[in-house]
Image (cartoon, helix red, strand yellow):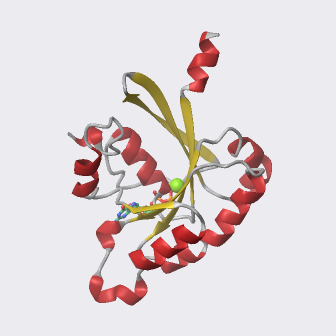
């Protein structure tokens, strides 16, 4: 029984997106509270965990990071998509190609999630690189918001490198602040 209870409090969250968008850095930031300046290329699948205290209940947040290599995907994909509680579709705000790839990531996810209603988030990483003078080479918030709406996702931007202060302020006190460990 106790192992069942423990398992029921583990939340498995997938982080999906093109290579280089910052999946490894973001999961490291969320779980270790630091920017990983020289991430090693992810081989196969990797996960990191973080304990959260939500209303006095201990929750284990398990963030799954993947390299997305074809060979890995064929053998591991079923395991990877099993018992998922939420998905983050990650792109790099300074790299429109990574945004354009999302449709195929979403389609792959759809094929494996077998119609389950899993909360999905569109996450624009590297917001620290947003440069208004180069707006044409970047993914605007407006574009991302309408994409999120069309795919029934929540949307936010973030940075594994320099977490925006507003996130810390907005989420303080609810036990879920992604950057709490920076304090
Ligand atoms: P992955 O392939 O999706 O796992 O991407 P990585 O986490 O390995 O990151 C790829 C590159 O982007 C690395 O050089 C990181 O230092 C850089 N990077 C990741 N997140 C950020 C961010 O929020 N801001 C900036 N400026 N660079 C980032
Ligand atoms: Mg990686």
Residue 139 shows in the view: no
Q: Is residue 42 above or below residue 12?
A: below
* Residue 24 location (% of width, % of height): 48, 52
* Residue 181 location (% of width, % of height): 28, 38
Q: Is residue 30 above or below residue 140?
A: above
Q: Is residue 85 left or right of residue 115?
A: left
Q: Quadrant of the N terminus?
A: top right
Please give the name of the residue rendered at 42% of the width and 72% of the height, measured from the top-left corner: 93
Q: Which of the 4 image quadrants contains residue 109?
A: bottom right
* Residue 175 location (% of width, % of height): 33, 35
* Residue 102 location (% of width, % of height): 60, 69
Please give the name of the residue rendered at 37% of the width and 47% of the height, measured from the top-left corner: 29
Q: Is residue 141 above or below residue 88?
A: below
Q: Is residue 93 left or right of residue 33?
A: right
Q: Residue furthest top?
A: 1
Residue 169 shows in the view: yes
- Along the viewing direction, whichever of 37 and 142 lies nearer the viewer: 142
Q: Quadrant of the C terminus?
A: top left
Count the marks.
Answer: 0
């Amino acid at each position: 029984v106790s192992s069942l209870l423990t398992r029921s409090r583990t939340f498995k969250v997938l982080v999906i997106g093109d290579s280089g968008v910052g999946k490894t850095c973001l999961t490291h930031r969320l779980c270790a509270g630091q920017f990983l300046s020289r991430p090693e290329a992810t081989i196969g699948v990797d996960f990191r965990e973080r304990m959260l205290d939500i209303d006095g209940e201990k929750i284990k947040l398990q963030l799954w990071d993947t390299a997305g290599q074809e060979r890995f995907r064929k053998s591991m994909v079923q395991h990877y998509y099993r018992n998922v509680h939420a998905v983050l579709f990650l792109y790099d705000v300074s790299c429109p190609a990574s945004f354009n790839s999302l449709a195929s990531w979403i389609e792959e996810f759809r094929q494996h999630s077998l119609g389950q209603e899993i909360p999905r988030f569109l996450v624009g990483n590297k917001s620290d690189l947003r440069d208004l003078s180069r707006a044409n080479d970047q993914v605007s918030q407006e574009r991302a918001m309408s994409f999120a709406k069309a795919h029934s996702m929540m949307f936010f931007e973030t940075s594994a490198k320099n977490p925006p202060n507003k996130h810390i302020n907005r989420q303080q006190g609810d036990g879920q602040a992604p950057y709490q460990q920076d304090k």
